[in-house]
Image: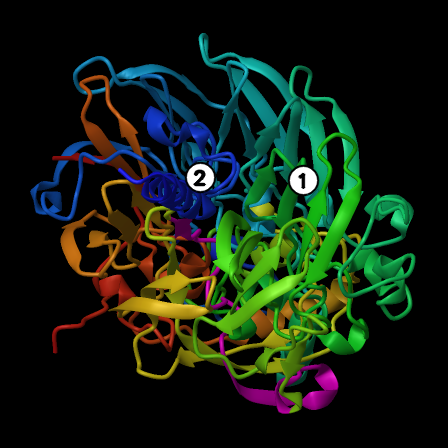
Amino acid sequence: MTPGAAAQGTGNAPALPAIRYDQHVWAGGQPPPAGTWARPTPATQETSKQGEQFFSSFNCDGCHASGAVGAVGPSLADGRWRYGGTDAAIFYSIFYGRPRGMPAFGGLLPAEVIGSLVSYIRSLEPRGDVATVRWDQ
Amino acid sequence: MLRSARIHRVVLLLLCTLRFASAQAPGSERAADGQWVMPAHDYAATRFSALREITPANAKQLRAAWSFSTGVLGGHEGQPLVVGHTMYVVTPYPNVLYAFDLTHEGYPLRWKYRPWVNPVAIGIACCDVVNRGAVFAAGKIIYNLLDGFTVAIDTASGREVWKTQIADVNLGETTPMAPLVVKDRVLVGTSGGEYGVRGWLKALDLETGRIVWTGYNVGPDSEVLASPARFRTAYDSGANLGVRTWSGDSWRHGGAPVWGWLSYDPLLDLVYYGTGNAAPWNTDQRAGDNKWAASVLARSPGDGSLRWAYQFTPGDAWDFDATQEMILADLPIGGRTRQTLVHFDKNGFAYTLDRGTGELLVAAPYVPTTWATGVDLATGRPRVNPGKVTGASKGNVTDICPTLEGGKNQQPAAFSPITGLFYVPTSNMCMDFAANAVTYIAGTPFMGATTPYRAGPGGNLGAFIAWDAARGKRIWEIKEPYPVWGGALVTGGGVVFYGTLDGWFKAADARTGAVLWKFKAGSGIVGNPVTFRGSDGKQYVAIYAGIGGDWFLLSGDVRSDDPADVRPPASFMPDIARYTSQGGIVWLFSL
């Protein structure tokens, strides 16, 4: 089993791109069982658009900037994840908060709203190959 | 000699002395002693040292004498202290305090203090995890931890003497500013204008750290500590200005943080400081002048009572924080010596006020400015360009100069009593400003605007200038490709020092602005140079290298250490990452 595959949610989640930088070592080589978190909000264009509005309404853009390119908080649009980039990981980041100052919104926002935010964030296309920046052309 | 000629000579001598004294700064008695014991060198915040070994004639011989990696990446704002023969350095989060022994080769540490600082503060601090420095008093080094605590460390042992919570990160408060000690009061303030805090200045007891008084910057007189008996403003009157000038109860989350510099006049017994922007950025949610955001306040340090206040940007519609330093200088204006306070505001105007009363004497733009055409000296109010006022109802307002980064931001200016000039690091940029409605949610940003930037007239994003605050005129200018985000130092030897965002540490002739020397310091400079006499008797200049502050948010492409955070370059500064990445180095230079 490939690392990361076991971390995907069940149900009708679309095939996820390869996720970098969030893979854990499995103790004893045993992957954790497939997660039981059920996505409360389907990932559609509509929920993604709603999520974009929520991203502004709930002040997410104040830290992550418009388009989630990063300011006080890290970029959410670069295809790379500090705490994991699966639906579940992003949901937990928003719901429970994270170290280094990501507030926990789970006491304030219903799961459906957070689900829409997850849809929006997941819809952000990372720029092509971000690994190289070149100035000498 | 004829008696009348001798009297004439005596009078002439007296006049010459008075003329020199008229450009003096109060509280600058420390100038000659070769130490640096408080953030801005002295209570007048001159950042002037009388040390004269380094001059325009020999500055090209400056060389790096020593360096030390702080072990921290993050914007290295602030400045070291030198007390006797020990140098103290506070790092950005996690706010390590280093004490270097300047009497032994290589300057090994005497001790280091590693506090626990809540990592939550990293995401609540709006503008990178900076620290603006410590102050020395009564055998203690006192500074703020980012997460809302003030600590006092015994210089002999490096042990913590007291630690006091002054602010609450859950309310969006963080504390990067440098404290000032006046008599037995430690004066501290909070950041959080982008998080809807209600800003304040607090005084702690120097020996115990106990909070003695809290003076809010907005709200009812009882909390602002303004009583009719003691509070006089030059231009406004009436009770509860901190409530009446706000629509509804918008003052409760009105901002007015205190994240900048403090100064003090020991003869008038007044502490001066500036307050930050009104919150939120969307003015529709807080109609009115919004006093005392974007203002200078003068308080008595003993009981915190507000004595006078003057507002630079009424109804702040541009995030024009006024937290920049208040430099105290006695200047010749209108044929007599005035006791003034000089302030280079984010809003692009340089102000000269009477520091006893808050009366406005001079106001002139020190960078290109479009939001206002000038400041009316009779009313003290800016002549606002109505087409540049922002708010959600006004849609996208274009071509506002300067940007909300300011003509100048946290990076402090310096004043030389010898030249009578101020040395000011500036930015030359303009912005559009499209406001939108926002909801206050404790612990989250409370802003409400999209504000793209571009270069101002001329295309250079910054300049280091010399300014005559008696006449409101620029005397000379060194253009820079990037905003000049590090502070200034000026010396008795006639040399000014400053650093650039692309990592150059420069020395220039204080009279002419000719660049004398420069050194590529390893990372962009956002800190403030200091100078001191080493244990070998030589003059040393110290500076931090380590880009950050607002330029970390906006130029996230300088970050290299976090593979999970890759950002596009800033549109108006697309190539800064070509010249610098994050760093953390303390440098010493000498001849």
Left or right: B161 as drawn, with respect to A16: right
Q: Is residue B376 above or below residue B297?
A: below
From the viewer's side, name the closer residue of B278 and A102.
B278
- Name the N-terminal-most of marks 1 and 2: 2
Mark number for residue B270? 1
Task: Please say whether residue B76 is visible from this viewpoint.
Answer: no
Type of amino acid at the residue the image marks with label 1: Leu
Q: Is residue B405 magenta?
A: yes
Q: What range of the chain is rendered magenta? A: B387-415
Q: In which quadrant of the rendered view does residue B279 lie?
A: bottom right
Hey, which residue is sitting farthest left in the picture?
B61
Left or right: B147 as drawn, with respect to B76: right
Q: Chain of mark 2?
A: B
Q: In which quadrant of the rendered view does residue B17 lie?
A: top left
Percent from the top left, x then y, of residue B497? 27, 49
State which quarter of the image contains the N terminus of chain B: top left
State which quarter of the image contains the C terminus of chain B: top left
Q: Is residue B291 above or below residue B104?
A: below
Hey, which residue is sitting farthest top in the picture?
B157
Q: Which residue, given by chain and number where applicable, does mark 2 sit on?
A: B92
From the viewer's side, name the closer residue of A90 and B227.
B227
Q: In which quadrant of the rendered view does residue B255 lie?
A: bottom right
Q: Which residue is at a point 70% across and 53% down the rendered structure image?
A: B357
